[in-house]
Every structure is written in C-alpha cells, then in structure tokens.
Amino acid sequence: MTLCSTLALVLHLALATGGVIAPKPAPQAADDTSGAQAAWDQLDAIKGEGADGELTGEGLSAWVDTEKVPTLMAIVVFGLLMFVYQRKAKAGQEISIRRIAGLDAMDEAIGRATEMGRPVLYVPGIDEIKEIQTIYSMMILRHVARKTAEFGTDLIVPVKDSIVLTFAEEAVKAGCMDAGRPDAFVKDNVRYLSNEQFAYCAGVAGIMAREKPAANIMLGMFFAESLILAESGFMTGAIQVAGTAKQHQLPFFVAACDYTIIGEEYFAVTAYLTREPNLLATIRTGDFTKWIGITLLIMGVVLATKAVGAEGITWADVFLRLAGK
Amino acid sequence: MKREIPILLTVLSGLLVTLAFFTRGENVAAGIETHWSKAVNAELLQWALIFFSVAFILGIANLVRISLKQIQGGGADAFYKTVMLIALFGYLGVGLGEYHGWWSFAGEGEQPMKLWIYDKLFIPLQATMFSLLAFYIASAAFRAFRARSLESTLLLVAGAIVMLGQVPVGDQITDGYASRWLAFLMVYVNGAGQKAIIIGATLGVLATGLRIVLGIERSYLSE
C-alpha cells in the first residue's frame, strides 16, 4: 500500500511535469479552425461552457455540476465492476478473502469475556449516524451482539449521539434475534452518555473502570478521545480490538490495543464475518480497482522518469514537486 | 413488507441524495435554476433535523431511566449518577428560567448564569479530560517504543528522529540533520503510508455506500 501511495504521488508529478495531459490551449482568434481548437470548442459546447469557462446555461452544465463528472464516472465504473463480480459470485465462483487477525480476535475477545464472566464493551465511535463509519459500526454491532447472545455474555454499548442510540438498540436487538435469544437483549445496556466529546469519553472510561469489561471493542469514527479510551481500557487489563478508517487515530490504537483493524479492513468486516458472496464481491471489486490504480501509477513512474532530462526537468525538480514545493 | 419498505426507502433516498450531489445549484448569471433534487435534498435534511431533536429527548430519557435504576440499586455508580442528574436538571432549570425571564442570577451587564456555568465549569472540565491525553501518550509511547522486534526497533528509531527533529536541540547536536530526516520521514514515509490508508478507506467507503444504496447490504435492518 505504501508503494501504491508513493506511485500515486509520482503519477501526479508525471501528469504535472511530463505534459501527459496537455493543457487546454488559450482561445485562438475567431477564424482559427485548427483541429485541436475545434475539438475544445465542441467539448465546451457539450459541457455548456463559454471560451473563458463561464456557464452558458445550455448543454450538460444546465443541470449537471460538470466538475463532478469524473467522480460520477469513477462511481459508475466501480458500480459496473461490482455488478460483474456479483454475477460471478452468484454463478458459484469462489471469492477468497485474506485472514484479518483483528476480526478473528473479536470472537476470541468475546470468548474470553464469557470465560471470565465479565461483560463486553462495544464503543461505536463518537460521530453521528450520517457518518458511514458509524452506520457500518452498527452493522458490526449486530454481529457482535449475536455472538454475545450466543455465549450468554452481557454487552454494554455506550453511545454519544441520541440517533445512534436508537440504531444501537435495534442492532443489539437484531443480533440477539439472530442468535435465537431475544431474551438476551438488555435495554439498559445500550446507554446514552452525553453529546459532548470528553464528557462521553469520561463516561466510557468510568464504565471501563467500574464495570471492568473483559473485552473492549472500539469500532467507528474516533477523534482526540481515541487514546484516552484505549489507554483506560488497557489499564483495566481488557483485551482490546479497535478499528477505524480515520488514519490520524490509527497510531494510537496500534500503540494501545491488542488488535487494530486498519482502514479498508474496517469496511470488510461484514463480508469477512458472513462470507456472503454478494458482499465478498464488493471486496474483490475494491481490490480490482486498486490494481487499476497501481497500473496507472506504474505508468506515472515511467512517464515521470522519462520527463527527467526533457525540457530541462531534473531529478531535483521531481523531488521538489513530490515534496509539494 | 417489513423489510422491503425500509430497503425501498433507503434505495430511493440514497439515489436522490446522490443525484442532488451531482446536479447544479442556482446560477443567476447563466440563468440556471436549482435542480429539483437539491430542493428535495434540502427538505430531507430538514426532516433529519426534526428527527435529531426528537431523538435527543429519547437520549435524555434513556440516561435518566438508567441513572435512576443505578441510584436505586445503590451500586458504585450511584453517587456519580446523582451528581449527573442534579447537574442535568439544574442546568436545564437555569437555562429555561433565564430564557423565559422567570429568574436571573446574573447582574446588570453580566453574562447569563447558563453561559457562566458553561464557560467556567464545563469548558475547564473538558480541558482537564483532554489534558489527560499528554500522560496517556507518554505511557502508550513507552510501551510502543520497546525494541523487542525489528518492527518495533524501526518504530523506536523513527520516533527518536521525529522527536529530535521537532526540537531545536536536535538540530544542534546533529548539525541540522534531525530536521531534514524528520521532513523525509513525514513527507515520504508517513505521507505515503497515510495516503495508502486513505485510498483503501475511500474505496471501502465507496463500496459500502453502494452496497447500502443498492440494497445489497441489509444487516442494518431488523428482522
């Protein structure tokens, strides 16, 4: 992945310095009918933009934000790839997924809590339900609730947002139903603590200190409170599994937790746990998209290398551009 | 139908919000009107705000119910829950009273009591909680930087360079190399790693979003 990102930077450099994408030429005189200018004019007409880039109120720009068209195209391509892989999965093609230690550890953590007769604490992050990581955390919570219900272990879910509270209650209830143990749902164990970040953090730390859960599972969107929660949990001796796609908080979790689910692994949890072909197909789509990206990046490396020496570009220029200078 | 209707609503709302993202807003100069999907999206956001307000009451109800039970049970939490309930309803009373003019604790030209409580009590308490982070960083770093394996040794060396590069004395004792190594580590090594995580997470977000919007992922629904 690091290589992948380095290559992304190089591609950016190649496009910028190698002249791979030729800049749009300055508007020529009205009588200029050269092929390049005519093509640009035609494209402008389709987009509904004038020579200076101003909107004309016609064409595509009348109702589409043309600056977002590349994003739309990327989503469409991704969606089509997903469709293809789903068809393959439905046709019986086996889609394997690599072992993710952090996800395997969740069962281990719940099992340990069961053996010790202590509860499991599930922290779904501190963001609102509109955040995709929080929505996803609710899906994982359902699986965790199913496991705890099967094992007959208490599950405590403190939440920061009142909408998340209703989702969390539903997720835990559904998980208990999945396990065939609707009686395992304890309404008082899904707790709204506070809408304020550090008040919530203090509340969770208090639960860790007083109720001493044997397993802390922290999955979702975290900010500055991540290390306070993880260290508080560490001090109680609980086995800790944390995961987030928020890259700035990952080092804290890596330092303080037993297992960390990093970035994209976080979004693979339901596919990994259920092994449902439809969901596995979306993971494969992401992998394939990465291969497309890597191919483009290698092309970028080649082009950037070729750019050195051309038009007075030196390796020093290349590195300065990489460093954002 | 208990499953189909929520899925249908999710798919329709998801597609509508996606459409609103890609359509154009009003541009008077070009004579472009706001696309209808943006108007519907704005209306949906208003509905969401109403949901949030109602859910806030549910949150408080949950908090009060559980706290009262714990106070009745007389466990370790009882004292803290009592303080919390007094603070909750006390602050609510102060705020409501001052808003409606039933009472005022502040003198002429002074800030209202509810703001005084917030500024002088709540913000320092939050800052206290946040300041704990400094000690937790030290204890977590102490554990992480133990040179037990090749990876942790690399982490230790990188951490030492970053710390040296951040302080003037680091440059003094390394003849200016510390800040250069720091820049190299942060721009190339750390930057590349972070971008790799961002790329992977973005693809994960895209896949999850599509799974939910297209109704493939249904585990958020109850049976």
Image (tube, coloured by chain):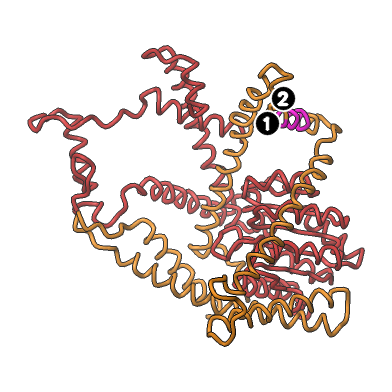
Chain colours: A red, B orange
Residue occupying image coordinates x 54% and y 40%: A290
Q: Residues within 10 Å of mark 2 (few under 14, many from 20)?
A: some
What SS does tag 1 mark?
helix
Q: Tell whether position B112 is magenta.
A: no
Residue A103 in view of the camera: no
Describe residue B5's horizontal placement relative to residue A15 as left or right: right
Residue occupying image coordinates x 52% and y 75%: B6
Residue A52 in view of the camera: yes
Where is residue B167, by image quadrant?
top right
- Towards the viewer: A72 or B144: B144
Q: Residues within 10 Å of mark 1 (few under 14, many from 20)?
A: some
CA–CA distance in space, label 2 to label 1 = 7 Å
Residue B75 location, x and y as percent?
A: 88, 77
What span is in magenta?
Answer: B154-163
Describe residue A30's horizontal placement relative to residue A114 as left or right: left
Residue occupying image coordinates x 62% and y 25%: B184
The chain identifier of the residue carrying mark 2 reads B
Spot the residue most to the right.
A116
- Towards the viewer: A38 or B7: A38
- Towards the viewer: B82 or B61: B82
Residue B164 location, x and y as percent?
A: 72, 28
- Towards the viewer: B14 or A321: A321
Residue B170 got which mark? Answer: 2
Residue topped by disc 1? B166
Q: Do the residues under discs 2 and 1 have CB atoms within 8 angstroms?
A: yes
Residue B199 location, x and y as percent?
A: 55, 42
The chain identifier of the residue carrying mark 1 reads B
Q: Tell whether position B160 is magenta.
A: yes
Q: Amino acid at mark 2?
A: Gly
Which secondary structure dominates the residues rendered in magenta?
helix
